[in-house]
Amino acid sequence: MGNSLSKLELIGLALFALLALNLVLDIDISIKPRSWLGKSPKPTSSQVKNAPTEDLEEIVLPSAGVVLPVRWTDLGVKMTSVGVIDAEKFKTLYDKRGSPDEVTRSLLLDTENGNLVITRENSGVILNFLWALGLGNKNPILERGPMAEPQYGGAGNFASTGGWSLARGQAMDHYSRHPFLVLTPEQQQLVERVSKNIYRPCCNNSTYFPDCNHGMAMLALLELMASQGVSEDEMYANALQVNAYWFPDTYLTIAKYLETQGISWKEVEPQEILGYNFSSASGYQRILAEIEPQPSSGGGSCGI
């Protein structure tokens, strides 16, 4: 017992000496508790609430952009050649918005483009290119899926079709007409399976029902990824990143909410976050009941 007391006294003296040095030399000393397995303690709600939003925005929406695992090659040229995109209408639109940059011109007119890169600044341009591709590419999802159900009075009545005004002729002249991306049966099954699990916060429909521009564009991205051999896990991961750029406020808010639950955005399962409980309009509204929305710059509407 005496030895134990002696050790405690020595520890106390050592701590006293350190504190005395701190007072004299202004040394910053802090003692932090360690939790099980050496991990940091779970942050409290107040700590998360006061965390810098700028840091979280950089994690969710990297300012440098993200290189997607798909090569664009000559898809812009193919789409302009058949009229899914009218090149003059497209260029006129972006001239009014400050003229298209060189990357946009290249995606539209060049034949040897590399991987798509999405950023905060060009997310709307990427959305429009993918929207056109999803609309025009021949695929059974458009022909036999929810878009074709008689109760809706025809596929031409949706925002994803009627809203596409940059075609030569009518948008429905190109609906599921052009074999830009020909998938194997296995690739088609993969696209259908993944598309049924990816939602968007502007509605309660999955990508399998691409009735708005975001849904049609996401369908095109899934087709591109499947056609170029991207794995299912990577499809979900990249779909989440693209959705975040398209709906920045939504996914910043989801990320903030998850932090209040002690979950880092870097640790989330993309398939879960893209599902109905988080990424649908209804799922997101439930999250908004728990946390204030997080503002950001960028993002696009359900139109061109």
Image: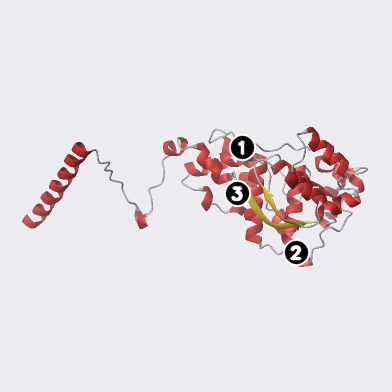
- The crowding category of the residue bearing disc 3, from other C-alpha atoms within 10 Å (few below 14, some 14 to 19, many at least 20), is many
Whether the residues at callouts 3 and 1 have beta carbons within 8 Å, the answer is no
Element at badge 2? helix
Q: Name the residue carrying label 1.
A: 249
Q: Amino acid at mark 2?
A: Gln
Quadrant into which the N terminus falls: bottom left
Q: Position of residue 15 (x, y in %)?
A: 17, 46
Q: Amino acid at mark 3?
A: Ile
Front-lying residue, 204 or 135: 135
Residue 251 in the figure: left or right of residue 103: left
Question: In this rendering, does residue 165 appear at all?
Answer: no
What is the number of callouts on the image? 3
Q: Name the residue carrying label 3.
A: 273
Element at badge 1? helix
Quadrant into which the C terminus falls: top right
Give how far apart the Cα atoms at labels 2 and 1 are.
32 Å
Give how far apart the Cα atoms at labels 2 and 3 are.
23 Å
Q: Residue at x 77, y 49 (%)?
A: 106
Q: Name the residue carrying label 2.
A: 187
Q: Residue at x 77, y 40 (%)?
A: 100
Element at badge 3? helix
